[in-house]
Image: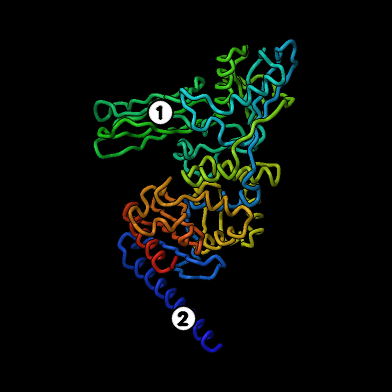
Amino acid sequence: MRKTIIAIALLLAASANAQNRLQQRIGSIVKQNPALSGAAVGISVKDLQGAVIAEYNATTRLTPASNTKLITTGTALHRLGADYRFKTSIGYTGTIEDGTLNGDLYIVGGGDPTVGWGSGPQITPAHFHGWWLLLNKAGIKGINGRIIGDSRAWEGYLEFGDWTYEDIGTYYGTGAGALCFYENSIDLQVAAGSAVGEPVQAMQSYPETPWMHNTNLGTTGPEGTGNSLYLYTTDLAPYAELRGTFALDRAPKTEHFANKFGALTCAWYFCNYLKNIGITVTGGAADIDRSGYIRTEEFVPREKAGEPEIIGAGQSERLGEIARQTNLDSDNFFAEAIFRTMGEEATGYAVYDSARVAEKSALKDLGLNPEVITVMDGSGLSRRNAVSARFFADFLAAMASSPAFDSFLSSIPTPGEGTLETLLKGKPAASRYRLKSGSMEGVLCYSGYLLDGSGTPVATVSVLVNGATASTSRVRKALETLLSTIAEEIPE
């Protein structure tokens, strides 16, 4: 017995010494690395039971950027389940006679962010065939009316109010609605003009939005000035302006901007799809404005929209798979759709306030106190988001007890894939992590799990940096040093 007690005491002492050593090494790296000089740094490393292994400034709330997506996807998987699927319903008004719908066909959105996702000029969106099967089952061979994109299921605006004006014109700030298409984005092929001050060359490639009035005010900038092109647009009217500069020495590229009329775009493409397979549609495409009026491609509000008779619904992939894509590519659009869906399912409203209520409820269910953090959106685009490294570590530990943990863990990328493509490249620690990145100007964060040799999580790790003035690459190298040190001190 005495020998056993001595052995346990020695193990505890060794563990304590290792923790102290890691604490000291973390402190030295933060204080001595020039890339972190003057920045706010928060670090928390805990075991899966929530016990502290090492921390540095761990309770200070910092802007987490896309680390916010860990909370969004985790709480959604915990609350809704990995098998949850978004639904898009097909309905109609009018009557069906001899195979002809004398009335309007409605595409009733249910928040599915994957409608038209990954499509392009030569690709037919996967959802369309399923919707056609529903028409066929209902005996509809022709439509004497319109195809109407119906996004009324979600209240509120597409974007969260404190996103920057520039961001809401980009693909990563377009905002999610009940019915979307191609993540509510548009692709422009851009190239510098022949001389400084000349107009930028810009041509929309996909999807087509013939109702839009686009003005190109972009100019060619001097060599070395980079790319500051932004599309300024709104869902209040079909107008957009391309502003900013594109340096003379930059190679042509595809830029991704916001399309604020996802429901109309979806209706337009489905209308063309039906025509291409031989189904007549006499009335073209339309959507429904915020006042509930049907709005055609000419953007003239017509009569009040009806309440369609639903003939069936198509389903998205599983939430587990969508969460994986969200975290792998740090997809803001998917994250906002998931966030607002939690609000819709919990309260019947998909506004941001209800989404926050639903998320707080899920955090409480996980045994956490949501009042110690501020989360404003689902993607992390808001700079009002404020979360400490310790909260991330505690959240990740709590998720280990969730029925959805396996799906959550598999949704988090490993170094070498997605947004972690170059992180820890060639370093032994790379195989031991599952991490979510988060970055915006002056911000770089990594949070996730440290694994043992069999791939089982043994610790939760959160490293948050705000206010950095060094280049992103230099800050990333400093954080790689921290992540490698943590892996060295915690055995497999």
Residue 399, numbered label: none
Say what amino acid the circle numbered 1 marks.
Answer: Leu
Q: Quadrant of residue 270?
A: top right
Distance from disc 2 to disc 1, alpha carbons, whole Å, reads 61 Å
Viewer-nearest residue: 457 or 212: 457
Residue 235 percent coordinates (x, y): 54, 31
Q: Picture coordinates of residue 38 (x, y %)?
A: 35, 62
Q: Which residue is mark 2?
A: 13
Q: Looking at the image, can residue 251 be seen?
A: yes
Question: In the drawing, what numbered circle is on residue 188?
Answer: 1
- In the image, 257 versus 3, the foreground residue is 3
Instruction: Name the quadrant of the N terminus.
Output: bottom right
Q: Secondary structure at mark 1?
A: strand
Q: Vertical placement of 451 versus 177: above or below?
A: below
| SS for dot 2 | helix
Which image quadrant: the C terminus? Answer: bottom left
In this rendering, would 485 be left or right of 249? right
Q: Residue at x 59, y 25 (%)?
A: 128
Q: Inspect this view and state whether residue 298 appears.
A: no
Q: Nearer the viewer, residue 364 or 230?
A: 364
What kind of residue is marked 2?
A: Ala
Rendering quarter of residue 19: bottom left
The relative height of residue 463 versus residue 256 in the rendered view (above or below) is below
Residue 360: image location, x then y, percent: 63, 55
